[in-house]
Image: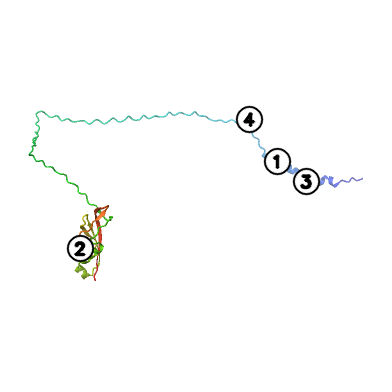
Amino acid sequence: MELKKNPKANLENRKKNFFLLGLVVALAVVLISFEYKVFDVTASKLGELQLDIMEEEIIPISQTTPPPPPPPPPAPTTVIEIVDDEEEVEEVEIMDLEIDDDTEIEFVEPEEEVAEEEIFTIVEEMPEFPGGQAELFRYLGKSIRYPQMAQDAGITGTVFVTFVIDKAGKVKDARVLKGIKGGCDEEALRVVAAMPSWTPGKQRGKAVSVQYNLPIRFTLK
């Protein structure tokens, strides 16, 4: 009678699997043997710290002694000149001044400093020509004589004259600020200098000197 085996119980079919498993195990053992290391550790030396402690050298602090103060300067010496008794001394003549009732004494009075008069340009009450502005223009029109040289050269224009009207209303220090030549500047100064006295300007109710500017126009007809 022939025995029949179950195909599942046949080990011949698993032979290949067992071979691969054994090969993997052998390879793993070889790898583990190469990676394994042995350390020689002495338990008695673990946790010990060796330090070389050097004693700190103490350096003494050097103290510098300040230099002594300089000696005081010597006191100035007084030179005394000794004169021999035999040396002659010049005699000083002393005048005897006798003052009686007939003696005239001359007193010299100190010179008083004259303060410069302040000249204003704008005041509360400006100076005024006698009769007002209209009379001033009428006076200029009657008094001005057109210079012949300016007429021949055809010179026209405006001459600006500045002058001071003092506390008494008199015209002084006239000069030309801007001229046109041809004799017109001189004619304008002549007419201004010949003006009658003005009503002086006032500042805070007091008469003062005022600088006044006047344009005088020269026109050919």
Q: CA distance from mark 2 to mark 3?
A: 149 Å
Q: What residue is rendered at 78% in x and 46% in y?
A: 17
SS category of the residue bearing label 3? helix
CA neighbours of label 1 inside 10 A, class few (<14), some (14 to 19), many (20+): few
**Label 1, label 4: how many angstroms apart (C-alpha)?**
31 Å
Judged by depth in the image, the label closer to the viewer, 1 or 2, is: 2
Q: Which residue is mark 2?
A: 191
Q: Identify the mark nearer the N-term, 1 or 3.
A: 3
User: Which residue bears the numbered disc 4?
Assistant: 43
> Is 14 placed left or right of 125 in the picture?
right
How far is mark 1 from mark 2, CA to CA? 141 Å
The colour scheme of the drawn protein is: rainbow
- Relative height, residue 95 to residue 187 (above, below): above
Which of the labelled discs sits on residue 207, or is there none?
Answer: none
Crowd rating for badge 3 (residues with CA inside 10 Å; few <14, some 14–19, many 20+): few
Q: Which residue is mark 1?
A: 30
